[in-house]
Amino acid sequence: MDFVAARKMMVDSQVRVNDVTDRALQAALLAVPRERFCAPERAFSAYAEVECEIGGGRVLMLPREVAKLLSALDMRAGERALAMAAPYAGAVLARLGAKVTAQEADQAVLDVVAPALAEAGVETTVAPFDQPQGEDYDIIISEGAVAGRPQAWLDALAVGGRLAVVEREGASGRGVLYVRGRDGFSRRDLFDAAPPMLAGMTPEPAFSF
């Protein structure tokens, strides 16, 4: 399979047509080998309009959706980024000049994506998703959905830092952008999306009598 041609087709038919107009981001998407972040036997589906399987129940976010989240972050070279369950997005941010840490909760998932992350210059760590490793990040991004406002992630942002994530309730969800100010957080809706929920990022069920 010609992955270079497939990558260009992805950017032309799924990214540019969905209002992702940043030339530097488009170039990064053309350069990062998305197939390296899929389970080897699923590499052929890396550039299709499907959530490509990584392993252990984890998938990559649809290309158009991850591109729109990345675009909303308006990243600047040299910023510190935390990619939460977002190995492909983390590699793209590194290509754009960010200093990226990729956090995974499952070592089996990290084993699949670690070689490509290492080549991209991305540091890796394994910890539960509700326990972000590090603090004062300029950027946090996730390719999985969360049930609501992820306060632990927001607390790991520096002032001026941005979080791009999908908040999902039931079958529907919205990509959102949070920005940390000196006195709190602002939130902006971006687009409809419904990637799979991240394990450990759903609230515990409440019981009443």
Image (tube, grey):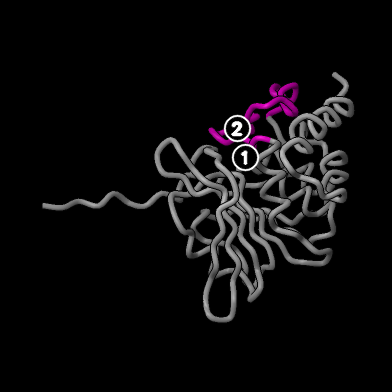
Quadrant in the rendering for residue 140: bottom right
Instruction: Check disc 1 and report its element: helix, strand or loop.
Output: helix
- Rendered image: mark on residue 146: none
Q: Is residue 196 above or below residue 71?
A: above
Q: How many labels does the image show?
A: 2
Instruction: Please give left or right for residue 105 compared with residue 66 in the image.
Output: left
Q: What residue type is labelled 2?
A: Gly
Q: Does the magenta stretch include residue 59?
A: yes
Marked residue nearer the N-terminal end (1 or 2): 2
Asked if the residue under mark 2 is in contact with the one under mark 1, i.e. CB atoms within 8 Å, the reply is: yes
191 or 168: nearer the viewer: 191
- Residue 111 point in image, percent of width and height: 68, 40
Q: Which amino acid does label 1 sit on?
A: Val
Percent x, y for residue 12? 82, 32
Q: Which residue lies furthest to the top in this view?
A: 1
Residue count near mark 1 (Cα–Cα under 10 Å), binned few <14, some 14–19, many ≥20: many
Q: Give the range drawn in magenta.
A: 39-62
Residue that numbered label 2 is attached to: 55
Mark 2 residue element = strand
Q: Quadrant of the N terminus?
A: top right
Q: Residue at x 70, y 32 (%)?
A: 38
**Is residue 81 covered in magenta?**
no
| Front-lying residue, 164 or 204 | 164
Relative height, residue 79 to residue 93 (above, below): below
Q: Position of residue 106 (x, y in %)?
A: 56, 44
**Nearer-the-camera pick, 140 or 178:** 178
* x, y percent for residue 128: 51, 54
Residue at 37% from the left image edge and 52% from the top image edge: 203
Task: Report the residue marked by disc 1.
Answer: 109
Q: Residue furthest left?
A: 209
Q: How crowded is mark 2: few (under 14 residues within 10 Å), some or many (20 or more)?
A: many
Label 1 to label 2: alpha-carbon separation = 6 Å
